[in-house]
Amino acid sequence: MKTPENPHAGSTTAPARAPRGTLSRGAIVDLATKIMDKDGVEAVTVRRLAKELGVRPMALYTYFRSKDDILGAVYSDLLSRLELPDSPEAGLAGVREVVHAYFHLLIEHSALIRLNIANDISNAGDLKVSEAIYALLLQAGLERKDAVGVAAALMRFTLGSASLYPARHNWDADADYWSRVKESLRTLPAERYPALRSFGDDLPEFTQEQVFAYGVDAILDRFEG
């Protein structure tokens, strides 16, 4: 069972009170987002938030029951910033728009990936995005089973691609990266790795954005037209 952090543990002097009226739910969420982006999810604690906001830890419990509630609010707030199609008439083009926007949000706020995995379907942010995707898929004519399968595949692919992005996006700025990959492939034993070795002379190049778009198209193209 998750319990609120003890606001008094290890405390010797109370921080000065913030000016009356300066503490709000939005101020807490904004600061928690900045800390999460800079130092990760673990760095978001009631004690640190209170210290940086200039209030006693107990003041935060007026707005949130626990750290988990704060992180849930951060997650919902960031997802609410996604620009979704105005109408389900956008169909599969609208689905592409949503998942690309979601991908960019995840790579901008990489800790969101962990929060997504920890959250359940009752989160308001998830419900908003899911409603948009399912409405678009159904309007595009997909059967209900296909809509569920496609939505699940897209979300998993988007989360996976965003998870890999921090470790691989530097490849895009490295002018020699693909040349080194090709050279490495050409050194493979032909008798053991004939298919891989063949790409040493003709290897298509992808940026991280391009490979993401390719994967989304691979999932959706069979339902076009």
Image: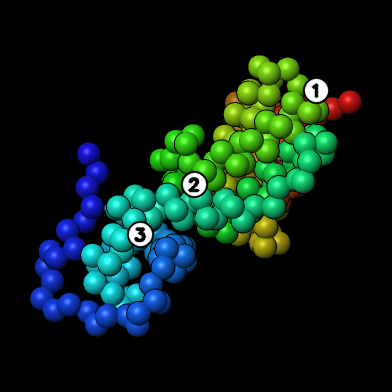
Give the residue type that dot 2 points to: Ile
Residue marked by disc 2: 113
Q: Nearer the viewer, mark 1 or mark 3?
A: 3
Q: Nearer the viewer, mark 2 or mark 3?
A: 3
Q: Nearer the viewer, residue 200 or 155?
A: 155
Q: Nearer the viewer, mark 1 or mark 2?
A: 1
Give the residue type that dot 1 points to: Gly
**Which sits earlier in the primary sequence, circle 1 or circle 2?**
2
| 196 left or right of 58 in image | right
**Relative image position of residue 50 (x, y in whole percent):** 29, 70
Q: Residue at x 13, y 71 (%)?
A: 11
Q: Nearer the viewer, residue 153 or 52?
A: 52
Report the Cα–Cα distance between label 2 and label 3: 24 Å
Q: Looking at the rendering, which quadrant does residue 213 occupy?
A: top right
Q: Residues within 10 Å of mark 1 (few under 14, many from 20)?
A: some
Q: Name the outermost residue toward the front.
A: 21
**Which sits earlier in the primary sequence, circle 1 or circle 3?**
3
Whether tag 1 and tag 2 are in contact, CB under 8 A, the answer is no
Q: Residue at x 55, y 55 (%)?
A: 78
| 79 left or right of 225 in image | left
Q: Residue at x 65, y 41 (%)?
A: 185
- Residue 63 bears which disc, if any? 3
